[in-house]
Every structure is written in structure tokens, then in C-alpha cells.
Image (spheres, rainbow, N blue to C red):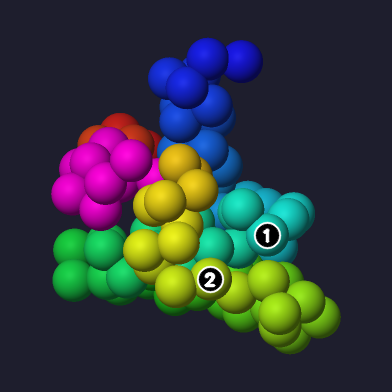
Amino acid sequence: MTAREFEAALLTRCAAVARDVAPVAQDQREANVFQLAATVIRSRFPRESIGLMQASEQYFATHPDERLAPGDVIRNGWVLSLPRLRDMLSQQLHGR
């Protein structure tokens, strides 16, 4: 899977969780990306932000040692940049 394909799949998953289609993060990467995504879309999409944060928190309730600082999520390459995450996820959420 290329980096672009991976990013597209992760954005699609964020949008689905934000819409409460799949309410639990499946792994550490998703949980940390969901938490960041919830933060960057909070002002424009408060309901969706809550869904992402809840999915993240449910995962971290059973895996507390897997929570990373935002900088570590970016350094791991799971998110390229916060503005890009916000813009691309906002586009997906607007496209309901």
C-alpha cells in the first residue's frame, strides 16, 4: 500500500467513526490518529469530534500505555501534518 493509499484509507476510517459507523479504534495507530483528528475538527464538527474521541478513549481504556503525544504520531508517519488532516477530513465529512 502506498503512503497515499494508506492516508486515504485512514481518512475514510476516521470519517466512518466520526459518523458512528464503527465506534471503536482497532489498534494503536487508529486510536492515536482518531484523538488527533477529534482535536483538529472540534470547532467545525463537534458531534463528529466526540465520536472520534470516544472511539479513541475506548481503545486507550484497555491499552493506556499505547497513547502517544501528537508529535510522536506525526513522527511515526501516521499523520503527515495537522492542517492536512483537518482539511482532508473536513472534506470527507462535508461530502456526507
In the displayed structure, does residue 81 sit left or right of residue 34?
Answer: left
Q: Is residue 86 magenta?
A: yes
Residue 15 pos. (x, y %): 46, 46
In the displayed structure, does residue 81 sit left or right of residue 63?
Answer: left
Q: Is residue 37 magenta?
A: no
Q: Residue at x 53, y 71 (%)?
A: 68
Regarding mark 1 in the picture, which secondary structure is present there?
helix
Q: Residue at x 32, y 70 (%)?
A: 39
- Label of residue 28 in the image: 1
Q: Residue furthest top?
A: 2
The dominant secondary structure in magenta is: helix
Give the mark toward the camera: 2 or 1. Answer: 2
Q: Residue at x 73, y 55 (%)?
A: 27
Report which residue position mark 2 lands on.
68
Image quarter of the C terminus: top left
Q: Are marks 2 and 1 in contact (CB under 8 Å)?
A: yes
Residue 76 pos. (x, y %): 50, 48
Segment tinted magenta in the rendering: 79-90
Label located before the other in sequence (2 or 1): 1
